[in-house]
Amino acid sequence: MFGSEKLSQEDAPVFEKFVAPRYLARFGELALDMLVSGPEARVLHVGCRTGEPDFALFERIESVEILGVDASEAALAVAEAKVLANGSPAIEYRIAESLPGDLEPGIFTHALCLHPVQSGGERPELWSALRWLLCSGGQALVSLPLRGSFQEVFDLLREYALKADDAEFARELEERLSECLTLETLSDEFEAAGFDDVDVEVRQITLPFSSGRAFFDDPATRLLIAPTVRAWLGREDLDGAFLYVSEAIDKYWSEGQFELTISIGCASARCP
């Protein structure tokens, strides 16, 4: 349900060192900018991975307790090591495959979720679980890529479909991209889940890469971006298409950096 693949023992420290500060932190920054809280808060961090941006919450809220849940034991081990190193007893991490699990309803003032990797059919279940766990007036904050993200990659996938004369792939590509979340449809999903006062803000960023191989070898691509592309397109068999994209990046951006566009959307929604 968390919408993210389990980080392996090898990938968890890589995620913490390279993906969290360079990529995932940008999603956390927008969520923290939309955070509304009194002097006390009890925060549920869903799919917390290695704990980005949990420590930043202590700078925003005078008194805060944080529970992070994730399906990866390796990721939680990295998060727990940071807690021990920084002496933050108000953060607890717990292994969980889904929500609500053994959590009681209505006990959290905030629910935070960054970059879930999900298809459209999976999201409503997660939004409903967040509503069930939040107290009345509690705030859900979900930050994720919206339609328009990774546009450079999708343009090259269109070119691949044309040159491969693969009309079926071209048709599927356009259909699935038309179903990707927008500012409006993200708001609609939260309202359908029973939330009030839904607000969605969008922020565009770019990530530079020196080559096609650097793009696909980058931990952010391997652990978050490529899985998101696969989830959006609903297919895993993209190795040939990705090879074309890598070679095309080297061809078209041979004299400069390849810059990937990401449209970050963050929904803030209140539990009635």
Image (spheres, helix red, strand yellow):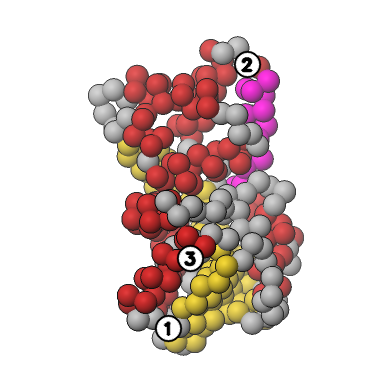
Q: Position of residue 129 (x, y in %)?
A: 69, 67
Residue 178 is covered by the magenta coloring: yes
In the picture of the structure, the residue carrying the numbered disc 3 is 76
Front-most of residues 264 and 123: 123
The reply, left or right, for residue 44 in relation to residue 90 is right
Mark 1 or 2: in front is: 1
- Looking at the rendered structure, the secondary structure element under dot 3 is helix
Front-most of residues 14 and 125: 14
The residues bearing labels 3 and 2 have C-alpha atoms spaced at a distance of: 42 Å
The type of residue carrying mark 1 is: Pro
In the picture of the structure, the residue carrying the numbered disc 1 is 89
- Residue at image coords 53%, 12%: 163
Residue 201 is covered by the magenta coloring: no
Which one is earlier in the sequence, the residue at label 3 or at label 2? Answer: 3
In the picture of the structure, the residue carrying the numbered disc 2 is 166
- Residue at image coords 45%, 83%: 90
